[in-house]
Amino acid sequence: MDKNVEAFMEDIVAKNPGEKEFHQAVQEVAESIMPFIEKNPKYKRAKILERIAEPERVIMFRVPWIDDAGEIQINRGYRIQMNSAIGPYKGGLRLHPSVNLSILKFLAFEQVFKNSLTTLPIGGGKGGSNFNPKGKSDNEVMKFCQSFMNELYRHIGPNTDVPAGDIGVGGREIGYLFGQYKRLRNEFSGILTGKALNWGGSLIRPEATGYGCVYFAQEMMKLSGKNMKGKICTVSGSGNVAQYTVEKLNELGAKVVTLSDSSGTIYDPDGIDSKKLAYVMELKNVKRGRIKEYAEKYGITYEAGKRPWHIKCDMAFPSATQNEISKEDAKILVDNGCICVAEGANMPTEPEGIETFQKAKILYGPGKAANAGGVATSALEMSQNSLRMSWRREEVNEKLQWIMKSIHENCVKYGKEGAYVNYVKGANTAGFVKVADAMLDHGAV
Ligand code: NDP
Ligand code: 2IT
């Protein structure tokens, strides 16, 4: 490891003990931008990297609620307000039993760079709770969301901090959160994105992360003279990002052969066509069932406890969670002829996996670039709320496509290494420059 990175990371580890996901995210960025900082001493003098790695504010709070059996439950809520140099804090809320400070700080840190890349004026934040929505009734989810907002409302606002969805938070949860905010503040304003269309939501926001990720993959493929038609694709997860990744891949003539959830993977060699995808959407978004039921319905293979990466593919779209592609998984993907990995999830590939992809010189689009279409469309939702207008589907989709193209161009600008594009270096550097310059302008705050 570079000496400067080593010294920097020693400090990060000492200040944030035990937060391994946060260390991982910070180290990846530090490694790719340290040479750039050394060449541009103004950033070094102003200690921009040191400041960027320190959240502006961390809010942690008790979330008590009463379950259907009348028992009191206590969860822990968080909001990490990481960086507001270029706009109000923006980023999702995650509801999952694994949620802790380390995971939310890694996500908030990633969000700062991602949001900077979108071309839009949004700072970075993330929040959530260790609440597990699985197996809870609608009433219990509502009670939790109301109690969570009873504290969060003090810290957010249309010009301060605008949360949205992430794992475990979709349209249902955003609705309950919005309702409670409106009641507490007596104010109808754009304090959340991912809202339903009839109360301030944007067309294409549900689709945006998955669509955007496929648009980004399309740009990477185009630049290297390839196209998506007929390509065999593996997708992990079966939630919001996975579903719309499949929809867009189908539209472009690719064939998706896997989906997964935390219990296992389905392998459908005939492809998950639009009819089967409609079944998945109903299964996951309405019935809240398990992906195993797909295998039973269509009589195909289900692999309990497995991820999709051992299945031969041309392109892979990790769309479930962090660290879901190990070094071994990455090696199998490369050995099986995979030419492109585009990350719908945040930090789904372990550092040694990234190294494996880069050594093999395959196309590798890191999450903060490839999945930025979701938050970018959230920013478009904020614009529409400010204007008190709503744009047509085609209009939003066109903007999303343009944004993904711009992100790709910016990654190429900063990540070109001869004929190869190092998209990690490109995304980290491009994301850094905009935030760093704003921080320089603002002085030592
Ligand atoms: P959803 O809650 O809609 O779906 C999550 C999916 O991932 C489910 O299939 C879930 O399975 C699976 N999953 C979650 N945790 C794990 C785990 N620990 N191990 C294995 N599988 C897991 O979330 P999203 O689709 O919104 O988010 C997926 C990823 O995309 C996350 O990394 C998120 O941060 C990222 N992302 C999301 C954006 C958005 O707009 N929603 C924007 C940018 C990135 P199960 O049902 O079994 O839990
Ligand atoms: O990780 C992400 O970018 C998101 N979960 C979406 C955040 C947002 O504010 O739309």
Image (cartoon, rainbow, N blue to C red):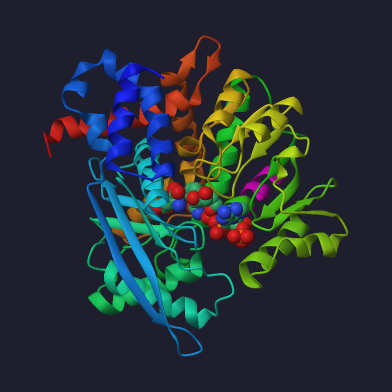
Outermost residue, right direction? 299
Most frequent secondary structure within the magenta stretch: helix
Relative image position of residue 443 (x, y in whole percent): 11, 34
Q: 321 or 258: nearer the eye?
A: 321
- Residue at point 63% right, 47% down? 245
Q: Is residue 173 magenta?
A: no
- Residue at point 74% right, 55% down? 274
The quarter of the picture where residue 46 lies is top left
Q: Is residue 240 visible?
A: no
Relative image position of residue 250 (x, y in whole percent): 72, 45
Outermost residue, bottom direction? 70
Q: Is residue 250 magenta?
A: yes
Left or right of 382 in this view: 235: right
Q: 173 or 380: nearer the eye?
A: 173
- In the image, which residues are magenta? 243-251
The quarter of the picture where residue 344 lies is top right
Relative image position of residue 211 (x, y in whole percent): 57, 45
**Which quadrant of the rendered structure holds the N terminus?**
top left
**Which quadrant of the rendered structure holds the C terminus?**
top left
Q: Is residue 418 visible?
A: yes
| Image position of 79 with respect to 107: above or below | below
- Residue at point 19% right, 34% down? 439
| Image position of 49 with respect to 98: above or below | above
Relative image position of residue 89 (x, y in whole percent): 29, 50
